[in-house]
Amino acid sequence: MTAEEFNELPPHLQAELALEQGHYLHHRIKGWCKIDLYWLHDFYVELWFLYDLKSIGLVRALTSYRQLDPYTETIKLRLKHHKRKK
C-alpha cells in the first residue's frame, strides 16, 4: 500500500490501520490537538486527536518530506532516497 492509496481509504479504516499495524514514533501538540506520528508500511501517518484525546479529527499519510518538518527538530526520521536516472 502506498501513502496515496492510504489517503483514499475512509478515515475509520485509516485510523484502524495506523493504530493496529503502525509503529508509534512521536507526538506533538498543535492548538487543541495531540498529533501522533506513526510509521506504517513504507510511509509516515499522522493521527490528530482532539482535545479530549478520545476523538480522532484527522488521519493522513504524509506524502512529502516538508510535512515532516515539525518533527525533525525533536526526532531523527528515516527518509527514502530516490535514485536519479542518468
Image (spheres, rainbow, N blue to C red):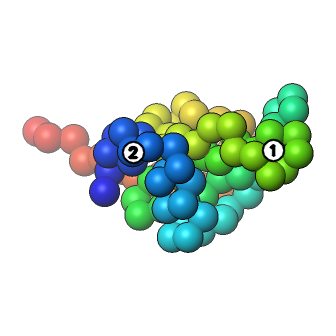
Most foreground residue, 44 or 17: 17
Task: Please rate how many residues cluster around mark 2, counting C-alpha atoms within 10 Å: few if below 14, some from 14 to 19, many from 20.
Answer: few
Residue drawn at 60 percent across, 64 percent down: 19
Residue 71 lies left or right of residue 10; in this view the side is right
Observer-nearest residue: 71 or 12? 12
Residue 71 visible in the picture: no
| Quarter of the rendering occupied by the N terminus | bottom left
Residue type at mark 2 is Leu
| Mark 2 or 1, nearer chain start | 2
Residue at 65%, 47% in the rendered image: 47
In this rendering, which labeled residue sits more in front, label 2 or label 1? Answer: 2
- Residue 11: give x, y in percent of width and height: 51, 44
Residue at image x 80%, y 52%?
Answer: 54
**Residue 11 visible:** yes
Report the residue at 54% width, 60% height from top: 16
> Which image quarter is the C terminus in?
top left
Q: Which residue is mark 1?
A: 34
* Label 2: which secondary element: loop
